[in-house]
Image (cartoon, grey):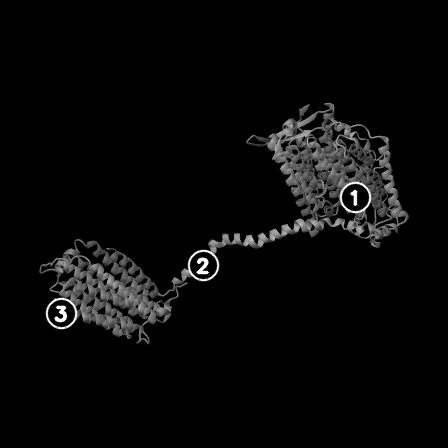
Amino acid sequence: MVTAVPWLRWIVLVPAAGFLFQVTAGRRWRGAVAVVGPGVVLAALALAVAAARQLDALGPGAALVDRCYTWLDAGGFRADAALRFDALAMVMTLVVTGVGFLIHVYSLGYMHDDPDFARFFAYLNLFVTAMLILVLADDLALLFVGWEGVGLCSYLLIGFWYAKEENAIAGKKAFLVNRVGDAGFLLGLFLLARTTGTLAVDGIAAHLPALRAATLGGWPVPLLAALCLLAGATGKSAQLPLYVWLPDAMAGPTPVSALIHAATMVTAGVYMMARLHALFALAPAALAAVAAIGAATAFFAATIAFAQTDIKKVLAYSTISQLGYMFLGVGVGAAGAAIFHVVTHAFFKALLFLGAGSVIHALGGEQDMRRMGGLRQKLPLTFSTMAVATLAIAGVPPFAGFFSKDAILWAALGGAHPAPAAALLGYVTAGMTAFYMGRLLFLTFFGTCRAAPEAQHHVHEAPATMALPLVVLAVLSAVGGFLPVPRVLEPVLGNAGPEAPLGLDVLGAALGLGGLALAWVFYVAQPELPARARAALGGVATLVAEKFRVDELYDRLVVGPIFALAGLAARGIDPLIDGLATSPAVLTRATSSTWRRLQTGNVQHYAFSFLAGALALVGWYVLRR
Amino acid sequence: MSPLVFLVVAALTVVAALTVVLHRNPVHSALGLVATMCLLAVLFLGLDAQLIGFLQVIVYAGAIVVLFLFVIMLLNLEREPRGLGPSVVVGAATTGAAGLAVLIVRGLTGGAPPADTTVEADFGGVAAVAERLFTAYLLPFELTSLLLLVAVVGAVAIAKRRPS
Amino acid sequence: MTGTTPLSWYLVLSALLFAIGTVGVLVRRNLIVIFMAIELLLNAVNLTFVAFARARGAVDGQVIVFFVITVAAAEAAVGLAIILALFRLRGTTNADEVATLRW
């Protein structure tokens, strides 16, 4: 049942107020920024908790709704600016505000010496606002506003240190690749609105029978709409083929990578598909596509992560891979498991990024793992928290990742829409994930320190503002698997299905431990093995190291032609239009420069024109008759 | 006047006019102008315009041309090395002027010739002209006197030597 | 009709004088001579008026000539004053050399 709750809007408005404060007064009051920045997110978290308790009191299947105002009302189509707090929104909101708050606190320490401190928190607050609009939107049109908003903030924050050109280029790349997906998203929205006349969540739910029967040009509408929406999700959640922006996005500050490109924004695609799972259920082919893309991306990204040397790039490809798992979950009809993985992934991936940030901070900016090592003793807190996160992502019980990843893989095998091939790929990838994450951990913290001498000299553990979030996230990564997320989401996303058989659980755990053990062998016990393996694989190893040259391929196929077209327009069309615009002036100047030569200043010349005029007039008068 | 007399006077007038226009010494041009004025006065007398004829000689030849001569002397102008402009200009001007003349004649003589009018003996005398002048043309008369005043003041103001 | 010379003869003479005056204005370089040519134009017109006055038997034509003469006098005075001032400024009365108000 739906209850009207007028104070829901404050969950969104409080961070927005924080943004406004940062933008106006923040530049002069650095101290105030440090309080207001994280403070508004904490306030939003508190409000979310209060809303969650009210929701819980109402029983399963309830929803809190806040209709703020009528936004669009034109020609039969109507979109309200309305917020909906149901089980799904609750989970997402708590993750966004909770993890968001921890990352805000972390940023106090990490960005402490940055002159653009206020601008950073302004963008962070703006991002939280947009993300909350996205997850709380009751109408797909409003969701799209949040969607675009987070895209904007992503661009702003990736290129935060814009003085360095490659950061700005990375921001542009993220925005443009997302735009490609957004085009698909919009087409899907148009299709839905055209068929059902509404974009409200409950409105679409009510029109499901009409949607089931509708066709467009011979194709069933649900399939077309779902595929279009899938395109949008692919862009935002960095799946094949639109994943290329995420590794480049690592150019932004590490807290940004943690918040936006791991925990929250990139999960927006998964959230959107979960929200519309009923629509996707009408098009099994689309679901199969989702699962296929998810599994393929998960495997593909994992292979690339094997050879990356930048610590943040490894985590970026890891994120792409884990997002693939979430897509797989949605694609096999286990949206609840997918959202569960969103939650656990938020915990351990944010922790991994923040920990990496701590390492980078400690080494004075070094990000190459080949120049790390042996930091176990010098950064004990960072090491222990990152170890917890590594175990979680590897899927080792009882840590968080084990439960959510297993739920997805079990659903892929025996759920509503099984996809055995995808499941197999998923298990293989799980082993690979454990291996490359182990590689990351061991290269960074074990062995001898290969860092430059003066960097080694300055190594110090993270300050309290950075350490505290690490600890909290470590705890969550450890016990977060026991959160009953799929069960909570049942009223919205459907039955979670039976528990996985013990055999598969053991397989999952074994793959995780096995991968870690193998990484230990390669990178701690016998460090000469990686080089031998690379030599043995030869060309394949090079291809993997160059991330399969996908960026170069896109450059040739897409970017090159577009630039050529733009050049054509600039050289061919622009002068034409400019010419048209300046033609009155040019014409005037040409004619006037000719005509003004009549003004010779010589009186007799003027007298001549008198004569000519007189001849004409008299002649006409006389010869008329 | 009889046609023969007219033709003689007319021929002399044309020669005098050509002198004005063609002679290179400005003083000779001025003398040519005097001759033209006087010959025209003769023509006026032949047309029963006695007052006008005398006024022509007194005012035009006697005052205006004298003024011209004063200025020529003041400026100490000399015989010009080449009086006319380039021959292209001369050719064009002559053609244009000739064309204009032809058109004028065509225009003025187009209609039926006026009937043979006889005029009273007093026609063209002082009384007759004055009678018209002070009745129908009184306003222009008064305005003309104003014009003369303006001209006098203006000429003096323009030609005055500026205190340096 | 005047004696036995037809009106048209007077008109032809007048047109001829007008043409000569026009050529003078257009062709001579000395400003003063140009001025004299202008006086020639005025006189040609005077002749036309007087001829018509006699032909129509109306004195009005002569009254107009009266005014023409007066105005010509005023105009000559002012014009020559200008030429004088110009000569003081430029040291020349050549029409080609005072063509400074140009493009």
Quarter occupied by the N terminus of chain A: top right
The residue indicated by pointer 2 is A590
The residue indicated by pointer 3 is B4
Mark 2 or 1, which is nearer the eye?
A: 1
Which residue occupies 69% across, 45% down? A174
Identify whether C61 is placed above or below A1: below
How many numbered circles does the render carry? 3
Q: Callout 1, which amino acid?
A: Ala
Q: Quadrant of residue B149?
A: bottom left
Characterize the local packing of mark 2: few (<14), some (14-19) or many (20 or more) Cα atoms within 10 angstroms: few
Q: CA distance from mark 2 to mark 3?
A: 60 Å
Q: Is residue A172 visible?
A: yes
Q: Is residue A151 left or right of residue C37?
A: right
Whether callout 3 and callout 1 share a subunit is answered no
Q: Is residue A376 left or right of residue B13?
A: right
Circle 2 sits in a helix, a strand or a loop, which is it? helix
Q: Quadrant of residue A122?
A: top right
Circle 3 sits in a helix, a strand or a loop, which is it? helix
